[in-house]
Image (spheres, rainbow, N blue to C red):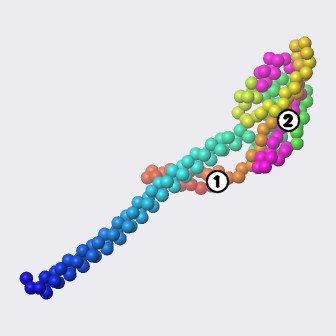
Amino acid sequence: MKPSLLSGAIILALTGLLSYHTVYMRVRKELRAIQTQEAQGQETQALRIKLADTLEQVERLRKRLPQTPETERLIHEVSTLANKAGIQLTGIDPQDPKPLQELTHLSVTLQFVSSYHQLGAFLSTLESSPFFLKVEDLQISGRGEETREVRLTIGTVYVPSTLPAVTSTVQPGGRQQGGTR
């Protein structure tokens, strides 16, 4: 083989190898970028699903709270529960709503006459209510009598909605559609 042919073949081989290496490295870099993008996409998908689940849980909990910062719903709820427990209310004194940072505290004071059994049934009914209710104060007066005068303060909180509700559906292939309502 002639030296010029041999050196041409070597140059051609080196050029081909260099071109192959350059293309190969560029493709590997693109592949790594795609793999990174795919991993980020999967992580984003998982976070969206977790966010949607968390927002659904927040909405379920929010349904246990008043929808407005007024005491009307609280009064209605405790009156209904008192009737279920056989309690006849003699007084209902709604307290003024009290702002507490991002919440509003709502409370109502009830007055009634009951036996210990009726009072226990009423407290049990309050505790098992689907709404968040807290007994804040309980005063019982009268001694040696079968029925007692009871003064009971019940409270809850109003939490304003700060986040829009998010719907999330995962489609076949792992694609997700999300939006606000």
Find residue 104 and report its horizontal and vertical position in percent: 80, 45
Does any portion of residue 68 appear in the rendered image? no
Q: Residues within 10 Å of mark 1 (few under 14, many from 20)?
A: few
Q: Do the residues labelled 2 and 1 touch (CB within 8 Å)?
A: no
Find residue 163 and report its horizontal and vertical position in percent: 67, 52
Callout 2 amino acid: Val
Does any portion of residue 52 appear in the rendered image? yes
Above or below, comparing residue 146 to residue 16 in the picture: above
What residue sits 65% from the left and 41% below the top? 60
Left-right relation of 83 to 59? right
Q: Which residue is identified by label 2?
A: 108
What residue sits 80% from the left and 36% below the top? 155
Bounds of the magenta span? 97-123
What residue sits 75% from the left and 46% below the top? 159
Label of residue 11 in the image:
none
- The magenta stretch spans residue 119: yes
**Distance from the alpha carbon under mark 2 to that under mark 1:** 34 Å
Find residue 162 and report its horizontal and vertical position in percent: 71, 52
Callout 1 amino acid: Arg
Secondary structure beneath disc 2? strand
Please state which of the two labelled residues, at mark 2 or mark 1, is closer to the viewer. Answer: 2
- The magenta stretch spans residue 73: no
What residue sits 74% from the left and 24% below the top? 124
Locate residue 110: give its quadrant.
top right
Query: Residue 19 versus residue 79: which sits nearer the camera?
Result: 19
Q: Which residue is identified by label 1?
A: 181
Query: Residue 66 versus residue 83: which sits nearer the camera?
Result: 66
The furthest residue to the left: 1
Left-right relation of 40 to 178? left
Q: Quadrant of the N terminus?
A: bottom left
